[in-house]
Image: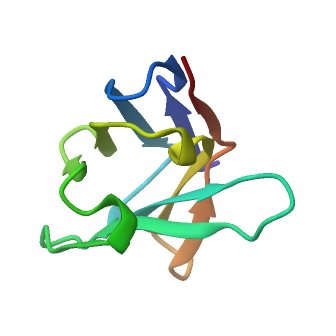
Amino acid sequence: QVQLVESWGGLVQPGGSLRLSCAASGGIAIVGAMGWYRQVPGKQRELVATITSGGSTNYEDAVKGRFTISRDDAKNTMYLQLNSLKPEDTAVYYCNANIYIRGSPWKLYWGQGTQVTVSS
């Protein structure tokens, strides 16, 4: 069974940094495009950044120049480096991935989320 597990959220002061990871496991043949999203209570989940299987990236305007998305296909793991964090970056961060398992169609999977809190 496929699982996506996010790690390394936490509490950080404004201007600080964090590096989130998202590890995929469970009989995976191919991992396609992956992405990071975030959500605060009472609001819709919003896109933060995406990365294709070829390494092309896309960022939401508010995080451009501060966040960097990357992936290590040998480990089926995606990362999000968060620098120059602001209080408005506080949210639960979720990862997703399009994954192919032999004998099944491509499917979009989500992780359980990791809390990032930016506060002094």
Q: Which quarter of the figure has residue 54?
A: bottom left
Q: Which quarter of the figure has residue 18?
A: top left
Q: Is residue 68 above or below residue 18?
A: below
Q: Is residue 12 above or below residue 49?
A: above
Q: Is residue 38 visible?
A: yes
Q: Position of residue 74 (x, y in %)?
A: 18, 42
Q: Which quarter of the figure has residue 90?
A: top right
**Residue drawn 27% across the image and 37% down it:** 83
Q: Please give left or right for residue 120 compared with residue 53 in the image.
A: right
Return the residue nearer the eye: 44 or 95: 44
* Residue situated furthest bottom in the rendering: 105
Q: Please give left or right for residue 21 compared with residue 2 in the image.
A: left
Quadrant of the snapshot with the C terminus = top right
Q: Tally the marks.
A: 0
Return the residue nearer the eye: 83 or 2: 83
Return the residue nearer the eye: 48 or 30: 48
* Residue situated furthest front in the rendering: 120
Q: Is residue 92 above or below residue 53?
A: above
**Residue drawn 38% across the image and 72% down it:** 60
Q: Position of residue 67 (x, y in %)?
A: 27, 50
Q: Please give left or right for residue 24 compared with residue 115 in the image.
A: left
**Residue drawn 68% across the image and 67% down it:** 45
